Image (spheres, helix red, strand yellow):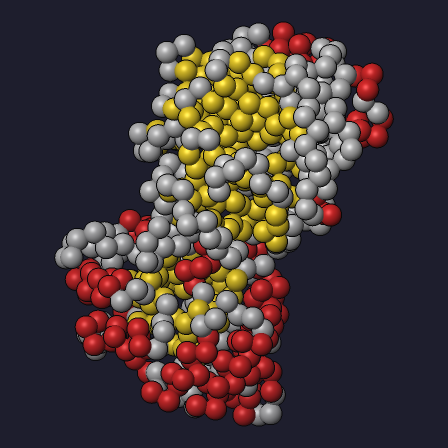
Amino acid sequence: MGTPNTTWPKRAGLSGIATLLAGLAFPPAAGAADGTPAHNSSQITRSSSTAAISAGATGASAAAAAAVAQPALTGPAAGSWGGGRLDLFYRNSRDGRLAHQWYLPGPLATWTAAESLGGTLTSQPAVASWAAGRYDVFARGTDNAVWHRWFSGGKWSGWESLGGVASSSPAAAAWGVGRLDLFIRGTDNRLYTRHYATSTGWSGWGSLGGALTSGPAAASWGSGRLDVFARGTDNAVWHKWFSGGKWSGWQSLGGRIIGEPAAASTGTGKLDLFARGTNNALFTRNYSVTGVGWSTWTTLGGTLTSSPSATVPAAGVTTAFVRGANGLYYYRQRSAAQVWSGWQAADAALAFKGLGAWVDTLDYSALSPATAVPVLKAHGVRTLYLGTARYDSATDILYPTGVDAWLAAAHAAGIRVAGWYVPDYADLTRDVRRTLAIATYVSVSPAGQRFDAIGIDSEYPLNVPSPSGWNQAVATHLAQVRTGTALPVVAIVLPPVLMRGWPDPSRWATFPWSAIGANANAVAPESYWTSYTAANRCAAGDPQYCAYQYTRGNVLLSRQYTGLAVHVIGGVGDTATVTQVADYVRAARETAAAGGSLYDYRTTQPGFWPYLEQLNP
């Protein structure tokens, strides 16, 4: 798996497995396909061949062989150990490593940023959970073997090899505590499996036959039951199940799909099946969820760029994940009452979307959370940006008693809190430590309050001995913070329009926009049209520095340079006018800024709020 953080286990029998997978012929699979008739969508209609997954080698055409999908790389792997929790695993397209985000339900819930779990994946991952606090993740490595790591006891294991020679992404299911079943497509396009039990360890690999043109999907509705799905040579979904101690033959479930199907079970005798149709929409059919056998295929819409994945986060609830056209992962959830939600993004930038408000360290003595937070709530503020310290502060968290009061009041009002820190990069170790102190902070009174996100305010000091060194420090700071926490991070930066008009063009030539894009979840340009330079240039007749065009330019350039969601900060409040604030909000909305705020809350005039409220969707 590249350079996994464990010693390679002994690859006992791997050469024998490789020979088995590569050399077996294609006899017909046991059992006949049942020829399930076509269903109700022209985009997911079934081929006429009823032997598309059970045919032998002599029956496989050259066209069918060419249709065999390469191992999928971009699809999600969705997991849950219950309680409404959702976990999302995927291959990071930047470095090929395993990435992991999670979502804990609640009134202030948001998705975490992605943590890296290492490895070098050559397929999308698969995940299964046999109990609360346990995940097992699988993926194909650079040697085409299946690699495995697991989460147990609050920590991740290293990677271990499970051998095999996979020609697809794996699939996994757990029918109970201490039991795992793993499936792959072999190099002969047959389905292969091995299983794990705590009493016996891992079994060897065995063939279940078939002629797969995709990786498999797997689900279990109870002890001793497994259901496996794959695409056949007719591009339909085919189904095989294990029950009563033996495997069935292959059954066609029709459809005409792209890539791997996905499956999940909400209870005994119930299955949900998902697939990407030929129009790139998400399609589904289910077994006995509504009290009958297999339903017909129906569409859930969307524009997919990957195969789907599905999981069950709570009793009777099914969640299906896909990758969208913009590279983000999206999901729809069906409630226990059989009602589907709309599409939602598994996006850590959610913490920075909509209307925000700013309180800096200079305002703690002048503002009371008990009076300020009700005002924020009344105007629809979604995130409070709370200053925690600066580079010249005496401690890592400057006013812990005040922080506790703001956290408690904001959370009680349904407002997220992002702690933000101002570095100067004279001491990078200190700056990283103080930023990560936000991530680890837990309030004392009332106990247990935490920050929901982090802001890094990389303002440009007046005297920098080395501009290129300062720019590099911005990148290093972000990278080290990203490694140290999964909290969402917003990079607060000087406005790119101002950088572009800087007297010395070389000053910003090395500013690390790409590092911001790689390590932050959103970018927040300080689009202060009242600042000395912008205000003077606007007054001198240059409209690109006036509120409307300045906001437009800073949103568009920040997005172009980083690829991130943009939370545009306007201001400053004590010298802004109502007309300027209206222009700022209009520009933010026209450029589809993810969110916005006026710096700062203390100087925000009452007449500004009706305009600022429009920054919420």
| Residue 268 image position (x, y, % from top left) | 42, 30
What residue occupies the far right of the structure in this picture? Answer: 62
> What residue is rendered at 39% in x and 28% in y?
130
Residue 463 x/y as whole percent: 44, 68
Is 590 above or below relative to 342?
below
- Residue pictured at 66% horizontal, 16% vertical: 31
Q: Nearer the viewer, residue 129 or 570?
A: 129
Q: Position of residue 116 (x, y in %)?
A: 47, 39
Which quarter of the figure is the N terminus placed in?
top right
- Residue 350 lies left or right of residue 605; in this view the side is right
- The residue depicted at 19 percent of the width and 64 percent of the height is 405
Residue 197 at least partly seen: yes
Eyeballing the image, is 495 above or below 137? below
The residue located at (69%, 47%) in the rendering is 41
One can see residue 273 in this view: no
Vertical placement of residue 165 versus 407, above or below: above
Q: Which residue lies most toward the left here?
A: 445
Give the residue furthest to the front. 292
Give the x, y percent position of residue 96.
58, 37
Front one among 400 and 552: 552
Q: How many marks can you see?
A: 0
* Quarter-of-image position of residue 603: bottom left
